[in-house]
Image: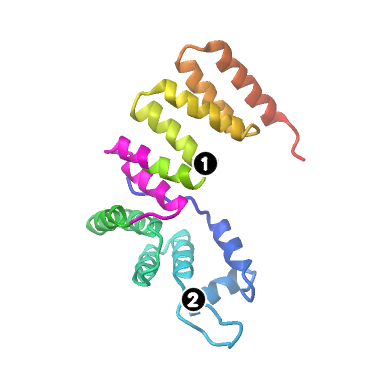
């Protein structure tokens, strides 16, 4: 299954609109992206950057314009400075647009390219889940070399170990670590509770469930 990508439309808009000289409203922001980044020092409109092409592609896809999104992902790849993640984003969009051959080609290109950032390694791992669990685990370990506290990577590693490789004890050790690093996460405690229950550790599972419920009910500050 192609990579879905974890960036929401709201995150994209906030990321872009935080830049100096970029309009804050959605309508103005879209207009800016449509015509290209405005150079705030010269007033000229330049060719979009790799990041801008990707962000515009995400906006277009969120708006239901898959053809436009594919065009922008292709333009981003043509800049030659694109993170590996974009191959998998493009593959996902092509897959759901009916271009299965194009999606396969983008995925293969993504695997051949060298990942250099956290999200790209996560994308590679998620794209391996269907047919290469050990390869997916190796990719997740690359994420953890970059960011040992990555909640996404630790959860993914635990899932691969427990569901894919049936290494329950190792998965539980990872679950313990991620709860230790992120003690206030209700979802992480609940997830560990499920794994504890599967291993027959009912008392500990019930304790995690009760703790998760208590934290969920805690008033937000």
Image-quadrant location for residue 212 = top right
**Quadrant (top left, top right, bottom left, bottom right) of the C terminus:** top right
25 versus 151 height, above or below: below
- Magenta region, mostly helix, strand or loop? helix
Q: SS class of the residue under badge 2? A: helix
Find the magenta span and give its range: 114-138
- In this view, the residue in front, 162 or 148, is 148
Q: Mark 1 points at which residue?
A: 148
Q: Residue 34 carries which label?
A: 2
Q: Does the magenta stretch include residue 120?
A: yes
Q: Nearer the viewer, mark 1 or mark 2?
A: 1
Q: How many labels does the image show?
A: 2
* Mark found first going from the N terminus, 1 or 2: 2
Residue 45 appears at what percent x and percent y? 51, 84
104 versus 130 height, above or below: below
Q: Which residue is drawn at 57% across and 57% down?
A: 11
Residue 83 appears at what percent x and percent y? 41, 60
33 versus 196 height, above or below: below
Residue 177 appears at what percent x and percent y? 54, 30
**Quadrant (top left, top right, bottom left, bottom right) of the N terminus:** top left
Residue 190 appears at what percent x and percent y? 56, 26
For this orientation, the residue located farthest to the left is 101
209 versus 57 height, above or below: above
């Amino acid at each position: 299954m192609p990579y879905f990508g974890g960036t929401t439309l709201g995150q994209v808009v906030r990321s872009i609109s935080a830049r100096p000289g970029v309009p804050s409203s959605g309508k103005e922001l879209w207009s800016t992206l449509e015509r290209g980044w405005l150079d705030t020092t010269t007033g000229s409109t330049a060719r979009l950057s790799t990041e801008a092409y990707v962000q515009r592609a995400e906006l277009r896809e969120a708006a239901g314009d898959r053809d436009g999104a594919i065009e922008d992902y292709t333009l981003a790849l043509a800049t030659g400075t694109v993170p590996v993640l974009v191959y998998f984003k493009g593959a996902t969009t092509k897959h759901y647009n009916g271009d299965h051959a194009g999606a396969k080609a983008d995925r293969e290109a993504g695997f051949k390219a060298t990942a250099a950032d956290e999200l790209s390694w996560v994308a590679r791992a998620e794209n391996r889940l269907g047919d290469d669990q050990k390869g997916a685990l190796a990719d997740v370990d690359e994420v953890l070399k970059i960011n040992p506290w990555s909640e996404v990577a630790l959860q993914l590693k635990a899932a691969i170990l427990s569901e894919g490789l049936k290494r329950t004890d190792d998965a539980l050790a990872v679950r313990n670590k991620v709860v230790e690093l992120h003690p206030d996460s209700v979802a992480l405690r609940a997830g560990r509770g499920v794994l504890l229950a599967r291993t027959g550790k009912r008392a500990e599972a019930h304790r995690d469930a009760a703790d998760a419920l208590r934290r969920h009910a805690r008033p937000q500050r």
